[in-house]
Image (cartoon, grey):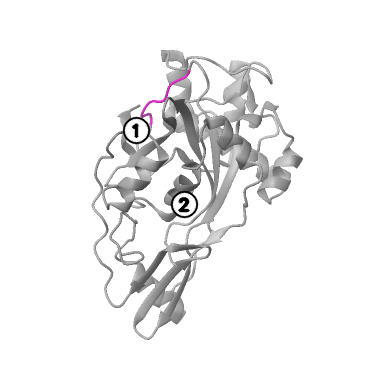
Amino acid sequence: MANGQANGQWYPPEWPDRIRALAAGTLTPVTPKRAATVMLLKDTGAGPCVHMLRRRTSMAFAGGAYAYPGGGVDPRDDDRAVGWAGPTRAWWADRLGVDETGAQAIVCAAVRETYEEAGVLLAGPTGDSVVGDTTGADWEADRAALVDRELSFAEFLDRRGLVLRSDLLGAWARWITPEFESRRYDTWFFVAALPEGQRTRNASTEADRTVWIAPADAIAGYDRGELLMMPPTVATLRGLAGCGTAAEALASATGRDLTPVLARARLSGEEVVLSWPGHDEFTKRVPGAAPAPATPSDPTGGAPA
């Protein structure tokens, strides 16, 4: 329950026990791994739609939840040999709140994971061009090699004669997985428009379905309890819902606050109170055992990618 209403907020039943263990000093927080995720947008006559994937229910982390393409930073994402176009690494370091090496790794992870999981590549032969169709067998072989870590992103770009188009990304938000979660990520959320000539597909082994859906429709599905989502996904969708076009979303990203959002948990007697600063709608008050997590379903109005 959030604000007294049922919704599709992802909430693992083991969290209250882990929160109590953290408060008792018997649980040591793990260090969050840096990660990046991308909200791909495409314009329609009714406004922009966002590309989302549904995580397989068998996944240990957020199984059944709808999310965006993304994943953890690869150790080789900070390779200085990466072909680069757009704002400098120094500019991105200032924007993301990290050093230049870390900034490159995060931006590279965003572009690489989008290609690995959605088949969309934000790169081109020059700093003002983007590749077209990437669905051929040779492209798929390279994509699989990236997924299997047989090929670094720098090697992939060099082989193809491409440069990463960092200017096609807009930094949108930053969320850190709560300290009591066993799998923790420090995740930067980016927004990008689907390049002309490219199309998404479900290339992820972690997803059983992908959709293009209007942010407002996704939010409505969540509010009805039909779509399971994590708080960062819901919060970013609510922000996207106010944008009339993909270009407008990209333009608005420049001024967005990237202060990390980290959940806070406290005990009030036997009750567990979980909150996300600045996002009151996600506050949970659990008197005893947590309720069973919401059951995921298919969104209405979304078309398979």
In this orientation, which residue lies closer to the viewer: 2 or 92?
2
Secondary-structure class at tag 1: strand
For label 2, the residue is: 235
* Residue 237 place in picture, x, y as percent: 45, 45
Q: Inspect the image, locate mark 2, and give the three-letter code of the amino acid beneath it.
A: Ala
In this orientation, which residue lies closer to the viewer: 182 or 265?
265
In this orientation, which residue lies closer to the viewer: 219 or 177?
219
Name the quadrant containing residue 105: top right
Tag nearer the camera, 1 or 2: 2
* Residue 121 place in picture, x, y as percent: 52, 25
Residue 62 is at least partly visible in this image: yes
Q: Inspect the image, locate mark 1, and give the three-letter code of the amino acid beneath it.
A: Val
Q: What residue is shown at x 35% (from left), y 80% (from top)?
A: 271
Disc 1 to disc 2: CB gap under 8 Å = no
Q: What residue is shown at x 66% (from left), y 47% (from top)?
A: 96
Q: What residue is shown at x 36% (from left), y 50% (from top)?
A: 229
* Residue 125 place in picture, x, y as percent: 64, 16
Residue 301 sits inside the magenta stretch: no
Q: Which quadrant, please, contains the N terminus?
A: bottom left
Mark 1: few/some/many CA within 10 Å (<14, 14-19, 20+): many
**Up/down of 184 relative to 103, above or below:** below
Disc 1 to disc 2, C-alpha distance: 19 Å
Residue 200 sits inside the magenta stretch: yes
**Up/down of 8 relative to 206, above or below:** below
Q: Which mark is residue 211?
A: 1
**Up/down of 42 relative to 181, above or below:** above
* Residue 31 place in picture, x, y as percent: 54, 60
* Magenta part of the chain: 198-203
Q: How many marks?
A: 2
